[in-house]
Image: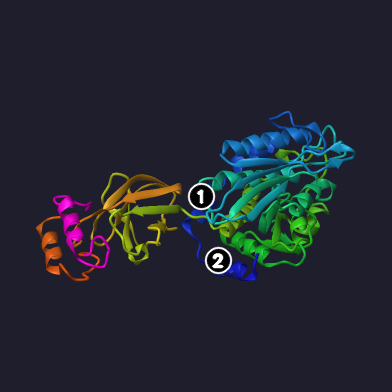
Amino acid sequence: MKAVALAATLAALACFGTPEQDIVNAISADRMMDNIKYLSGATSSIKTRYTPSSGCFAAANWTKAWFESLGYTVTLQTWGTVDGYPAAPNVIARKPGTNGTNQVFVICAHLDSVSNQNWTNAPGADDNASGSAIVMEAALLLQNYPTEYAVEFVLFTGEEQWMLGSSYYVQNPGGRQFLGAINCDMTAYEKNPGTPIVVAQCNYIYPLADLVAQLSQYYNPGRAVARHEQCPSDQWAFGYAGIPNCMVAEATADQIWGGSNPNYHRTTDTWDYLHPQFQRECAIAAIAGIAHLANVSNGMAAVLMPEYVGDRSAVTVEVQLREPGQTQTVGLFYLPLTTAGTFELPDDIPAGTWDIAVKAPGWLRSVAATVSVPSPLGVTVLLKPGDANNDNRVDMSDLNAVLLAFGTVGSPHTDIDGDGAVALGDLNLVLVSFGEQGEP
């Protein structure tokens, strides 16, 4: 990522939008534990995820179907062999960005596992069904939020054979421009009360890791963050390609590979040794990070003003937030339109179902009813012209206002069609809407 873009992201850190907070609030330890149990064989027939094993292929196929059930486009990326056997593929689920480019942020984890019984019994609940469950949780929670940048939710294989799958992915971008990556590896074992969350980076590229560490401290008050450099996991592939990166993990980096979890790389790495609340806090750090970097939003609204021929960017609309079926305003915003006649739904609108009422000077108020926020497909509001004196009804006073200004440049109220002159077109719009009343 360009340095200026990362600097802007860090500068905006204090301005947390409601979409990001809503996503953090919705992170579920129970849901992640269910996926950990499935991947580690407690509730499935997957007894090992050793990269060339049938269990790892089964896990890749299951997660592919799971991502597809959320509506993502999913690719199985084959990359080579392990011990002379075909390796299970990387699983890549893609969320397009609203900017329409191939600029991509990645949240990833490794799907494969090892033990002293690789081919038959390597449950890998902490290492690394836990990190995989965070990636799945991120995909679930971001599915309805528009993001400015594309996001790829990636489960790599071959990590235990020294980052083979992630190296292939980074070295074969296929047109992607990688802006940054957050890797999750071993995130559910709390060795002692107060065990820190480690946030590490590779190749001395600090800004993205700094951001994730700050987000963790903001959303996980009281949970320490330990910083580290060069932890061997899939963020390495990004770091050595010069791509901003970080790893979210349990404990401190020295402890992870020095005995943080006594079940590390053993057949006893099962779900019942894990700590759901600690898993949730690690998930908060990673998922808040990807939501912030990708710039989640509540969506866009299109304001249709068919008779308006002026510059839409000169129009400021009044937007009222209401409980469904009610007229009382619970949130009020004044927002400029773009030249295309759109505005971004404010971050201050909480997730839920709302009525959204829109009013422009000289136009009758219109209500988009029962809008789901976030609104990935967008909101459309059709405004009717004719309210020349902006009192939400069209009557003789509006007719008089247009007649008094007739032949002049007028104001936004009397120049209803926005053509720069008060003329017959404006008078006709009043007459067409005569007797109509806007929403109170």
Residue at 55%, 54% in the rendered image: 100
Residue 94 lies in magenta, yes or no? no
Amino acid type, residue under disc 2 in the picture: Leu
Q: For mark 2, what is the residue?
A: 13
Residue 274 visible, this angle = no
Q: Secondary structure at mark 1?
A: loop
Determine which quarter of the picture holds residue 402.
Answer: bottom left
Q: Would you place residue 32 above or below residue 416 in this image?
A: above
Residue 423 lies in magenta, yes or no? yes
Residue at 61%, 51% in the rendered image: 151
The crowding category of the residue bearing disc 1, from other C-alpha atoms within 10 Å (few below 14, some 14 to 19, many at least 20), is many
Q: Is 153 displayed left or right of 391 in the figure?
A: right
Say which mark, if any, is on residue 145.
1
Q: Is 391 displayed left or right of 20 in the figure?
A: left
Q: Is 73 displayed left or right of 347 in the figure?
A: right
Amino acid type, residue under disc 1 in the picture: Tyr
Residue 229 x %, y %: 77, 64
Q: Viewer-nearest of labels 2 and 1?
A: 1
Q: Which residues are magenta?
A: 415-440
Please report whichever mark, 2 or 1, sits nearer to the chain's N-terminal start.
Answer: 2
Most prominent secondary structure in the magenta stretch?
loop
Residue 174 x %, y %: 70, 51
The crowding category of the residue bearing disc 2, from other C-alpha atoms within 10 Å (few below 14, some 14 to 19, many at least 20), is some
Q: How many numbered marks, from 0 up?
A: 2
